[in-house]
Image (cartoon, rainbow, N blue to C red):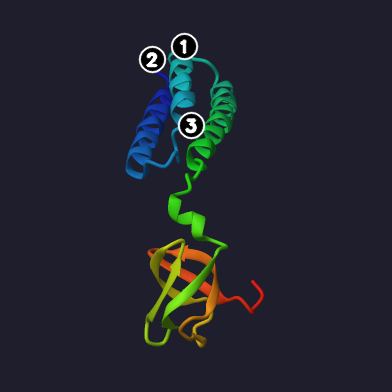
Amino acid sequence: MIDMMLYVWIVFFILSVIVELSTMSLVAIWFMPATAIAIVLSLFSVKVWIQVLVWFILSTLTFILTARLAARLRHRRIQPTNADRVIGLTALVTEPISDRNQTGMVKVMGQIWSARTDETTEEIPLDTEVRVLRIEGVKLIVAPLNKPM
């Protein structure tokens, strides 16, 4: 006679596959190998507590291995672009910068960029030297040189 736990493990395996396929984010993948082993143990009528213990240990091990792999895949090194070279450099305002009017241009390394200030109330007049703080999209975020970074 087939053990009832066999059906429990099969249902759990199918649910794990469905959850993993629907999320694609390594939520339930570590349960699948452990559940497959539990199914085999159930076929050989191994005691239920041993099946559950083996499932728990294998799930924990595969979780640890999968979590490390997922962390490595998620934290890939960001490759800087050539645009990043302008961060920290001094630029010259070629069109007054006004966040209120959404206007402003600067020249840095011989290139003209759209620019905004770090503070929304501040306006920066023409021919002012500014420091490039960061890039947001295609705009440089700048601050006047006389202000601390």
**Label 1 Cα neighbours within 10 Å, binned few <14 / some 14-19 / many ≥20:** few
The residue located at (48%, 16%) in the rendering is 41
Q: Which residue is mark 2?
A: 1
Q: Which residue is mark 3?
A: 30
Q: Amino acid at mark 2?
A: Met
**145 w.r.t. 86: above or below:** below
The residue located at (39%, 17%) in the rendering is 2
Asked if the residue under mark 2 is in contact with the one under mark 3, i.e. CB atoms within 8 Å, the reply is no
The foreground one among 98 and 61 is 98
x, y (%) of residue 142? 52, 73
The foreground one among 39 and 61 is 61
Sequence-wise, which precedes: disc 3 or disc 2?
2
The residue located at (37%, 87%) in the rendering is 101
x, y (%) of residue 13? 39, 30
The quarter holding residue 1 reads top left
**57 w.r.t. 44: above or below:** below
Alpha-carbon span between mark 3 and mark 2:
30 Å
Q: Amino acid at mark 3?
A: Trp
Alpha-carbon span between mark 1 and mark 3:
23 Å
Q: Which residue is mark 1?
A: 44
For the view shown, which residue lies furthest in the top direction?
44
Q: Amino acid at mark 1?
A: Phe
